[in-house]
Image (cartoon, grey):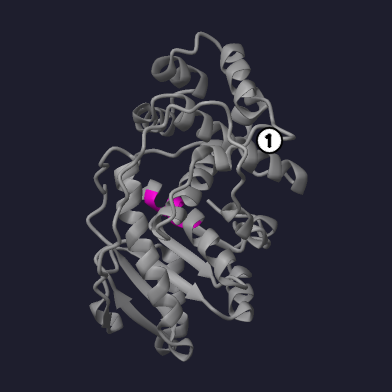
């Protein structure tokens, strides 16, 4: 539920398209999800909906007190430095409300499991962000932003492209927490965030993406085997291996969404998040008789 610094720094690459399409897809066209007006109401700290706050969020609010301003939208409580103004937090809130509706739609009309708002803390100042990270021993110091439970801690990107990509990725993590019971394994959690983060961001911008422009033939040059991917329980220490984890996960989720009936994916995600082994869930939802068959079909997808 966190994103490596090198991935955040290259988030703009998610927006690049290529005219080389992968061999046939069966993904049906999706109806565009229109943007909707977002209600933004600034509130005092004593009027906040604090039901979704984690202890770390409560500590942040308690330590800095009046340095924070707060606003609430239908599904989010925004926290931003009083000295930094509302502009960045407002943009984050608009994109976040869109992703709330988008992920719910993509997961077959999934209903929110929690009757409370998520909390988003924005950091426009890198010094403030690094100071905050020092108080989080369980979060890697290279983390650019991260989501935990119903809270997101978001550092402003160096440019609009980077910022939009990071927010889309982390917001997908947050929405999975809202809509999916259980805990997706690392590979599936990151693969879903990469896939929906990319396509959701394009839809937010009103740009329709053909899957072949993202999952190009030959685009996955150094994949992990599915056996290794499914066995990874924590982020590798080597940056190259982290890259393989993210890209292979994204391509495998893309494979299931593009080459298989996409309406099967929510059930697959629910089962694996609930503890079903990936191999068993692939057999149940996609009729793969064994891991070797899944590996063979997946290889044809990315070659």
Above-or-below relation of 294 to 142: above
Q: Position of residue 271 (x, y in %)?
A: 39, 28
In the rendered structure, the answer to whether residue 2 lies left or right of residue 114 reads right
What secondary structure is found at the residue carrying circle 1?
loop
Give the camera-side residue of 143 and 168.
168
Q: Is residue 148 at all visible to an observer of this figure?
A: no
Instruction: Look at 32% across and 49% down and name the residue there.
Output: 32
The residue lying at 60 percent from left, 43 percent from top is 19
- Range shown magenta: 170-175
Circle 1 is placed at which residue position? 220
Q: Is residue 81 left or right of residue 16?
A: left
**Extreme front residue here?**
19
Nearest the viewer among 161 and 92 is: 161
> Dominant secondary structure of the magenta stretch?
helix
Q: Is residue 216 magenta?
A: no
Residue 205 position, x and y percent, is 42, 60
Where does the image place residue 109, in percent across and percent down from the top left? Answer: 25, 41
Quadrant including the C terminus:
top right
Q: Residue at x 59, y 79 (%)?
A: 128
């Amino acid at each position: 539920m966190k994103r490596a610094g090198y991935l955040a720094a290259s988030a703009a690459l998610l927006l690049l398209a290529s005219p080389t399409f992968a061999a046939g897809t069966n993904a049906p066209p999706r109806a565009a999800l229109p943007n909707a007006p977002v209600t933004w109401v600034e509130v005092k700290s004593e009027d906040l909906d604090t039901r979704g706050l984690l202890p770390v969020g409560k500590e942040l609010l308690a330590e800095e007190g009046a340095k924070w301003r707060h606003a609430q939208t239908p599904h989010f409580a925004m926290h931003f430095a009083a000295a930094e103004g509302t502009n960045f937090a407002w943009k984050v809130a608009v994109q976040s409300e869109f992703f709330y509706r988008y992920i719910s739609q993509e997961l077959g009309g999934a209903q929110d499991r929690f009757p409370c708002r998520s909390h988003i803390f924005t950091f426009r100042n890198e010094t403030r962000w690094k100071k905050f990270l020092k108080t989080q021993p369980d979060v890697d110091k290279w983390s650019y932003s991260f989501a935990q439970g119903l809270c997101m801690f978001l550092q402003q990107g160096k440019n609009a492209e980077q910022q939009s990509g990071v927010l889309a990725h982390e917001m997908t993590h947050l929405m999975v927490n809202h809509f999916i019971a259980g805990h997706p394994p690392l590979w599936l959690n990151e693969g879903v965030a990469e896939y929906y983060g990319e396509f959701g961001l394009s839809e937010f911008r009103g740009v329709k993406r053909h899957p072949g422009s993202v999952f190009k033939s030959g685009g996955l040059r150094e994949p992990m085997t599915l056996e290794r991917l499914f066995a990874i329980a924590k982020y590798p220490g080597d940056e190259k291996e982290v890259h393989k984890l993210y890209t292979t996960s994204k391509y495998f989720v893309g494979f299931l969404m593009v080459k298989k009936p996409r309406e099967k994916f929510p059930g697959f995600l629910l089962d694996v998040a609930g503890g079903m082994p990936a191999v068993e869930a692939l057999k149940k939802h996609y009729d793969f008789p064994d891991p070797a068959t899944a590996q063979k079909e997946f290889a044809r997808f990315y070659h």
